């Protein structure tokens, strides 16, 4: 498939939502609400669950909803500041009680309404990125659909990031890119190709650690495989000192991109 076809697949209304993954992967779920500052954001489905009887974890999932009513209630999966602050509150709680954090990302981007800006949308995203970089507990993120801009990165500053095979991850939506570069909304397919948004692109650039095969006809089996990978990763992290975990996370992000060192030359 072309990048644009994968974009449309990632946005398909038939794809499982964030809550579907959580409810299939975790057991004994306790949903937690509120940011303790303003209110609750239904776009962020979060709480505590068990990967198995001995492995509790904090889960944070962006949920788009399944029908018009739930999608309106969840802002079509575009979190507001209180959603990101709720997520950060639960991350800090997980750090306190030594629980890993598992995030599921599926968003066009953070909510861009006036009320979100009034309540500090940019600051909320920035605080999440800053705090996650130093969070003293393992963090794993899976991009299950769209990974749009800072709205996704606010839950993806993690030790390991995975993507579903038809998911996309981008600094800007192809529509936004087309309107800026070409002033033409018909150039969306070209923008999608230029942005390198696919899972295979992200793996090539070493932005993600792996690609998860999609099998929605056998969703329970697919989620069982994801649970197995999560437990494998957490077992690997369990043997690391906190200082090493944080150092590895820092260097994971510092190595992104290609750099060319230019030697200084004497002026002639």
Image (spheres, rainbow, N blue to C red):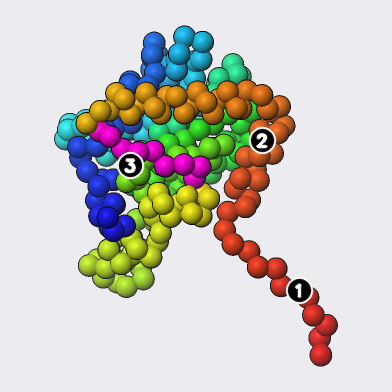
In the rendered view, would you say 185 is above or below 28? Answer: below
Q: Is residue 10 magenta?
A: no
Q: CA distance from mark 3 to mark 1?
A: 42 Å
The residue beneath circle 2 is 246
Q: Quadrant of the C terminus?
A: bottom right
Q: Could you say where residue 127 lies in the image, as x and y percent from the top left?
A: 55, 39
Secondary structure of the residue carrying numbered label 3: strand
The residue beneath circle 1 is 263
Q: Is residue 211 magenta?
A: yes
- Disc with the residue nearer the chain's start (2 vs 3): 3
- Relative placement, left or right, of 131 versus 204 is right
The residue beneath circle 3 is 145
Q: Is residue 23 visible?
A: yes
Q: Which residue is rendered at x = 36% and y = 34% of the image?
A: 62
In terms of depth relative to the viewer, which is nearer, 83 or 220? 220
In the image, which residues are magenta? 208-216
In the rendered view, would you say 170 is above or below 123? Answer: below
Q: Residue furthest left?
A: 68
């Amino acid at each position: 498939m072309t990048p644009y076809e994968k974009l449309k697949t990632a946005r398909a209304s038939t794809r499982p939502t964030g809550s579907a993954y959580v409810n299939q992967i975790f057991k004994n779920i306790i949903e937690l609400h509120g940011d303790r500052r303003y209110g609750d954001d239904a776009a962020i489905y979060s709480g505590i669950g068990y990967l198995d009887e001995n492995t509790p974890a904090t889960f944070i999932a962006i949920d788009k909803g399944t029908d018009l009513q739930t999608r309106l209630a969840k802002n079509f999966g575009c979190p507001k500041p209180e959603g990101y602050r709720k997520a950060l509150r639960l991350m800090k709680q997980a750090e306190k009680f030594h629980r890993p954090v598992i995030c599921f990302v599926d968003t066009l981007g953070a909510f861009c309404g006036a009320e979100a800006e009034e309540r500090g949308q940019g600051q909320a995203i920035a605080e999440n990125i800053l705090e996650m970089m130093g969070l003293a507990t393992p963090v794993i993120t899976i991009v299950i659909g769209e990974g749009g801009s800072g709205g996704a990165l606010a839950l993806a500053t993690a030790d390991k990031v995975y993507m579903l095979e038809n998911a996309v991850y981008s600094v800007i939506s192809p529509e936004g890119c087309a309107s800026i570069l070409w002033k033409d909304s018909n150039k969306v397919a070209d923008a999608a190709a230029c942005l390198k948004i696919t899972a295979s692109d992200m793996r090539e650039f070493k932005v993600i650690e792996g690609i998860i095969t999609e099998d929605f006809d056998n969703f329970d089996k697919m989620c069982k495989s994801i649970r197995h990978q999560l437990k494998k990763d957490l077992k690997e992290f369990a043997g690391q000192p906190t200082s090493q975990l944080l150092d590895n996370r820092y260097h994971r992000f510092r190595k992104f991109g290609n750099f060319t060192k230019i030697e200084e030359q004497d002026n002639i």
